[in-house]
Amino acid sequence: MYFSLTPDIAYDAKPVSYPFSEADRIITNNFFRRYKINEDAYGYATFYKKYSVQQGIKIETIANKYYGEPFYDWVIILTNNFINPQFAFPLDDYTISKVAEEKYGDDVYSGIHHYETIETKSGQTIGSKPVLALEGGLRVDKTFYDSPFTYWNGTQSVTVAGSTVSKPVLNYDHEVQENEKKREIYILKKRFFFKFVEEFKKQNMYSKSSDFISKRLKKTGV
């Protein structure tokens, strides 16, 4: 359905032939034309709701649930600025395993991709809130992992092994982590849905120019 709403372009089939006739042009969909959502819009809860994509759920299923037609999957693709929906949408466990195995080969389940910090509390509190000695989830190198780590617990310096406040992340686990980040997407609320579709249609109309043929068709320059 997406490509039925985007305009066409007539390009030159025989650039060495001049003058051109309509028979010298091939009409095809202008799939290079992109519609991009302003990222500031995602800060407005009025327009969107967050949705967590569960295992095995397809984008067409979500479109059908919220917009009544699976063909409106393109609305979800556009409102999330997915460049390549095949890889922007979370993969199932079987597929992520195959992708990781192809990417890393024999090192997929044993090779270290990077090291990552573990949330570590200092022992201090501000009010009732514990003070962190080290934030979790920060990417560090092997030198950090192998070296001592020192922090202040409120009364004295404490030194621990870097391996107690960081951990190796294997190649497969890294791919799973990256895949999990894709689970949270934005769903345009239904009361704004029809206006969005109409606005999309308007933006895909050509304005008059030297290449203009109609609102839905233009030619490439000669």
Image (cartoon, grey):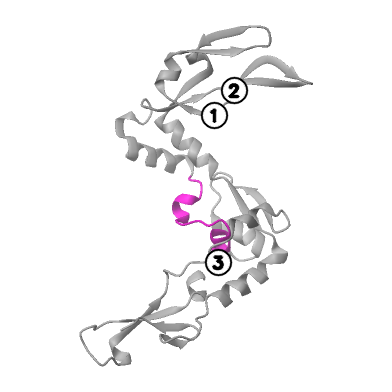
Q: Are marks 3 and 2 in contact (CB under 8 Å)?
A: no
Q: Which residue is mark 1?
A: 137
Q: Relative to residue 75, is residue 211 drawn left or right?
A: left
Residue farthest along the right direction in this orientation: 127
Q: Which residue is mark 3?
A: 71
Q: Nearer the viewer, residue 179 or 81?
A: 81
Q: Which residue is mark 2?
A: 119
Q: Relative to residue 115, is residue 48 drawn left or right?
A: right
For marks 1 and 3, the one nearer the N-term is 3
Q: Amino acid at mark 2?
A: Glu
Q: Relative to residue 153, is residue 46 drawn left or right?
A: right
Q: Amino acid at mark 3?
A: Phe
Q: Nearer the viewer, residue 28 or 14?
A: 14
Judged by depth in the image, the label closer to the viewer, 1 or 3, is 1
Q: Kindly state the secondary structure of the residue where label 3 is placed.
A: helix
Query: Within 10 angstroms of label 1, few (less than 14), some, or many (20 or more) residues?
Result: few
Instruction: Using the numbered discs, state the Cα–Cα distance from disc 3 to disc 2 in whole angstroms.
Output: 44 Å
Instruction: Using the numbered discs, state the Cα–Cα distance from disc 2 to disc 1 in whole angstroms.
Output: 7 Å
Q: Kindly state the secondary structure of the residue where label 1 is placed.
A: loop
Q: Is residue 88 magenta?
A: yes
Q: Are marks 2 and 1 in contact (CB under 8 Å)?
A: yes
Judged by depth in the image, the label closer to the viewer, 3 or 2, is 2
Q: Kindly state the secondary structure of the residue where label 2 is placed.
A: loop
Residue 79 image position (x, y, % from top left): 58, 59
Q: Amino acid at mark 1?
A: Gly
Q: Which residues are magenta?
A: 73-91
Q: Quick check: 70 above or below 172?
A: below
Image quadrant in which you'd find residue 100? top left
Q: Quick check: 211 above or below 126?
A: below
Q: Is residue 196 magenta?
A: no
Instruction: Using the numbered discs, state the Cα–Cα distance from disc 1 to disc 3 in whole angstroms.
Output: 38 Å
